[in-house]
Amino acid sequence: MAGHSKWSNIKHRKAGQDAKRAKLFTKIIRELTIAARDGGGVIEDNPSLRTIVDKAKSSQMPKDTMERAIQRGAGGLDGGDLTSLTYEGYGPSGVAVLVETVTDNKNRTVAEVRHAFDRSGGNLGTNGSVAYMFDKKGQIHFEPGTDEDAVMEIAIESGADDVETSDDGSIEVLTSTEDFLNVKDALVEGGFEPANAEIAMVPKNYTLLDIASSEKVIRLMEYLEDLDDVQNVYMNAQFPEEFGE
């Protein structure tokens, strides 16, 4: 994508979460509980749980906090009233938005999500209105300066679907959800620790924004991520290189 960086998107999306570590931990605990509830508490036998455990570790969550969340979910002691829901809509400049939530009160959550869209100049859509613009994939990012040839060789040999390099030198490795952990493990064993690695909703195409539009879209992202029930926000926004400098 000439003149644009996918890594800049990830940095902007993660910055707000990292700045609010307590809230981030609460959201990860919910993910751990639900994954253990739905797939069991043995990490080696539950790929979804393994992915979230890796996410928790990279966020520096204490081990005992992770273990308690997993035990609660696997033992049926917690998480029974939690439901995962995804909302779709459009943000400023027609940016497509997917909002993944975990809630025990659907009415509260949809009201809060709708308000976030309204106050930022966007609008909440119906199911299916933008989901077709995204694919669920494994997404592994490396910051600029990483050896592109070496990453590409390991990634392709271990089953990655694609490797892309942005103009700023950041690298994105895309995988199927099934091959995500194998590819990630192979890269780590090869000496390449990702800056970010997750199962994500990856846009098929991007809406290129100017500075003014980028600021409005980031505002919507911050509104949504500040909601307790929101787990992840995905957008097909592509910020200009100079944004945030």
Image (tube, rainbow, N blue to C red):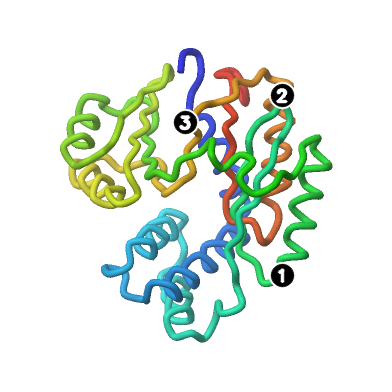
Question: x and y percent of residue 131 in the render?
Answer: 56, 42
- Does 221 appear above or below 66? above
Residue 173 left/right relative to 190: right
Question: x and y percent of residue 25 in the render?
Answer: 55, 62
Q: Along the line of sight, which residue is nearer the eye, 131 or 175?
A: 131
From the image, tell me which residue sits under label 1.
105
Looking at the image, is mark 2 or mark 3 earlier in the sequence?
3
Per the image, label 1 sits on a secondary structure element best described as: loop
- Spatial CA span between label 1 and label 3: 34 Å
- Spatial CA span between label 1 and label 2: 32 Å
Q: Quadrant of the C terminus?
A: top right
Q: Nearer the viewer, mark 2 or mark 3?
A: 2
Amino acid carrying mark 1 in the image: Asn
Looking at the image, is mark 1 or mark 2 earlier in the sequence?
1
Residue 189 left/right relative to 54: left
- Does 149 appear above or below 103? above
Residue found 71% across the figure and 44% down from its top: 125
| Figure quadrant of residue 82 | bottom right
Q: Along the line of sight, which residue is nearer the eye, 77 or 161?
A: 161
Q: Which mark is residue 195?
A: none
Residue found 68% across the figure and 20% down from its top: 211
Q: Which mark is residue 213?
A: 2
Residue found 53% across the figure and 39% down from its top: 132
Per the image, label 2 sits on a secondary structure element best described as: helix
Question: x and y percent of residue 20 in the render?
Answer: 63, 53
Question: x and y percent of residue 154 in the render?
Answer: 18, 36
Give the residue furthest to the top.
Answer: 2
Q: Which mark is residue 7?
A: 3
Amino acid carrying mark 2 in the image: Ser
Q: Are the two marked residues, 1 and 2, in contact with CB atoms closer than 8 angstroms?
A: no
Assess disc 2: are there few (<14), some (14-19) or many (≥20) residues with their C-alpha within 10 Å of its C-alpha.
some
- Spatial CA span between label 2 and label 3: 18 Å
